[in-house]
Image (cartoon, rainbow, N blue to C red):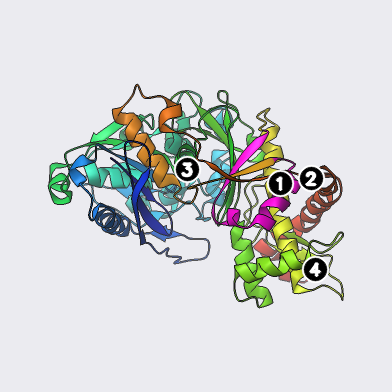
Amino acid sequence: MYLGIDLGTSSVKAVLIDARGEVRASASSPLTVQHPRPRWSEQDPAAWWAATEAAVAQVLQGQEARRVAAIGLSGQMHGATLLDDADQVLRPAILWNDGRSDVECAELEKVPGFREVTGNLAMPGFTAPKLAWVRRHEPDVFARIAKVLLPKDYLRFRLTGAFMTDASDAAGTLWLDVRKRAWSDAMLAATGLTRAHMPEVFEGSQPAGRLSGELARRWGMDTVPVAAGGGDNAAGAVGVGIVRAGHAMLSLGTSGVYFAVSDGFKASPETAVHSFCHALPGTWHLMSVMLNAASCLDFTARLTGYDDVATLLADAEEAGLREGGPLFLPYLTGERTPHNDPHARGSFTHLGPDTTRADLANATLEGVGLGLLDGLLAVEGTGVVADEITVIGGGSRSAYWTQMLADILGKRLVLRAGGEVGPALGAARLARLAVEPTASLDEVCPMPAVTAVREPDAARHAYFLQTRHPLFRRAYEQLKPLYTDAARGDAFRPS
């Protein structure tokens, strides 16, 4: 058996798979996020470890733990976990959705060769700007830093005592030379760090440490290898078999992610496309990210008095999407691809006296879809084009919405069994590859069985692409100055 552990933002999940790749057991333990100041998002690494121990204990209950041959790790990307020379945590970890470091991002963009090396724009979500912020605002903490670890790699340290990471997670720090899959001394120096502060980089399917004897005894396991693993999106892709060039995945969770495997290193930082290493050797991927996807449905349900999202979806389907109806911009907490605008906010426009809450529900579904179309077009601008897209995440459960998305994107959308297990399954598959290096990807990482297919309607796609999408883009461009002025306070000052 193989154990996969995924450190998410809201919970730690653990799964056990058997030698055939079937899920034998799964468990989760909740986490909370702290927001001590506006735009700040933090967690206590001690809470990560407590949740991990709880999830592992639960998933091993009733199982023959001695049969576990390897452990794989996945986790939320970009988080900054700072340790001193006694391996003690110096401050709460700064998370992927923390927005405090926009000034530091502008400074990093001035480093010679920055985009060419990192393959990405500097955004507050990434790790390097967070360290630049700590250096400026918490110099006493910065001076004591001995190691900087990504969230899942803090778990690795607690599991093995080793400081190691994988290339997919490291690519999201802005310290990695993504083409070479190795730390960049120049990028590290830009934030006052050296390779001595970094964990060693491995491929996701390589062993990277062994379970400590103390934990092995406590969990009834052997001192098994711990695979390097992957960032959550890369591991999630491995979990649904998105492992070869031409494969693509759409994740409809709180955020929305379009993930496409590329045939080598490609980048488009000017459109805020993320260019990262995949969790498999010699493989890269491109990713567009919108910060608010399924979360927008919760927002509109609350705003319009629906009991829950399921009721909103049912009402939207019964009413249908009216041509020329309201338009929704889904930028509730800013946006990444393609705008890289932390100040953008959501809005409804084109309202009339006959607008109903079902119209607002449909506008929300459409607006998220048009935002995903922005991201898909940005990725396709690099030459990476997929004809078929696997859909995962909570939003994939709605047949009405997934058909609307197929029409908006103009792509065949495929739903597959087991997509809800997510990155923890990918981590378990990487664990298997770590101890079976000769096993084929087709054997270890198959695509799950198809449960449904959404074929795009050509006429509806033309309507979305030629009429609604240009209107959507113009609405953002017209409102962008107001977002910036409001962030500075200019909107409230007399002229």
Whichever of labels 1 and 4 marks the residue nearer the N terminus, that label is: 1
CA–CA distance between discs 4 and 3? Answer: 51 Å
Whichever of labels 1 and 2 marks the residue nearer the N terminus, that label is: 1
Where is residue 163? Give x, y as percent.
Answer: 28, 38
Where is residue 210? Give x, y as percent.
Answer: 22, 36
Q: Is residue 103 magenta?
A: no
Q: Which residue is denoted by mark 3 in the rendering?
A: 236
Q: Which residue is denoted by mark 4 in the rendering?
A: 495
For the record, the magenta segment spans 387-411
The crowding category of the residue bearing disc 2, from other C-alpha atoms within 10 Å (few below 14, some 14 to 19, many at least 20), is some
The crowding category of the residue bearing disc 1, from other C-alpha atoms within 10 Å (few below 14, some 14 to 19, many at least 20), is many
Q: Which residue is denoted by mark 1 in the rendering?
A: 406
CA–CA distance between discs 1 and 3? Answer: 21 Å
CA–CA distance between discs 4 and 2? Answer: 50 Å
Whether 12 is drawn above or below 67: the answer is below
At label 2, the amino acid type is Asp
At label 4, the amino acid type is Ser
- Is the Cβ of the residue at disc 3 closer than 8 Å to that at disc 2? no
- Is the Cβ of the residue at disc 1 closer than 8 Å to that at disc 2? yes
In the foreground, 311 or 166 = 311
In the foreground, 372 or 109 = 372
In the foreground, 294 or 265 = 294
Q: Which residue is denoted by mark 2 in the rendering?
A: 457
Where is residue 348? Give x, y as percent.
Answer: 76, 65
CA–CA distance between discs 1 and 4? Answer: 46 Å
Viewer-nearest of discs 1 and 3: 1
